[in-house]
Amino acid sequence: MRRFIFALICSLFLTVPTLLADTAGDQIVGTYTTTRKGTSSKIKVTKLSNGKYRAQVVWIDNIKNADGTIRTDIHNKDKAKRSVRADQIVLINAVEYNAKDNCWENGEVYDPTSGKSYRAKLWFEGKKLNVRGFLGPFHDTSIWVKQ
């Protein structure tokens, strides 16, 4: 019986930190608003089945082109993705939570205005999520506000 209790206590000590890290990482999940280059949008961050996170546009204020057609991801380097509606573009893909630094990293941030992807790092300052894309030593940061 003592061995069983000891094994139970050991498994709790090994399991609880993992559960707490998952909970802390999940604070990024939700809906955000942002304005970038004059365009306002809503973005939804979700957790993938592999434990990583992704962010996808769910609404954009000027979805139509001047000719009335729906805007699409025309700058995407992947020709198969150029027909994706502007209100369905994946902006952040496969970021992982880093509990030590309290940030999400090791994924990509996509800029639909240029069609380029960059190394991503995300972190909170209050309710504001800083979304930074890196290309070598250069970076650009957008601010997303959690709803």
Image (cartoon, grey):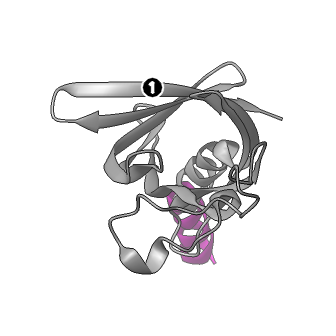
The quarter of the picture where the N terminus appears is bottom right
Residue assigned mark 1: 141
Residue at (33%, 51%) from the top-left corner? 116
Q: Which residues are drawn in magenta?
A: 1-14
Magenta highlight: main SS: helix
Judging depth in this view, the residue of 58 and 1 nearest the camera is 58
| On-image quarter of the C terminus | top right
- Farthest-out residue, left: 136
- 24 above or below 92? above
Identify the element where label 1 is drawn: strand
Residue at the limit of the structure toward the front, as seen here = 67
Taking the spot 64% from the left edge, 27% from the top edge, the residue there is 38
Residue at (43% x, 51% y) in the render? 110
Number of residues whose C-alpha sits closer than 10 Å to that of mark 1, classed few (under 14), some (14–19) or many (20 or more): some
Residue 95 in percent (x, y) is at: 44, 53
Q: From what the image shows, is residue 123 above or below residue 108?
A: above
Is 69 placed left or right of 52 in the picture?
A: right
- Amino acid type at mark 1: Thr
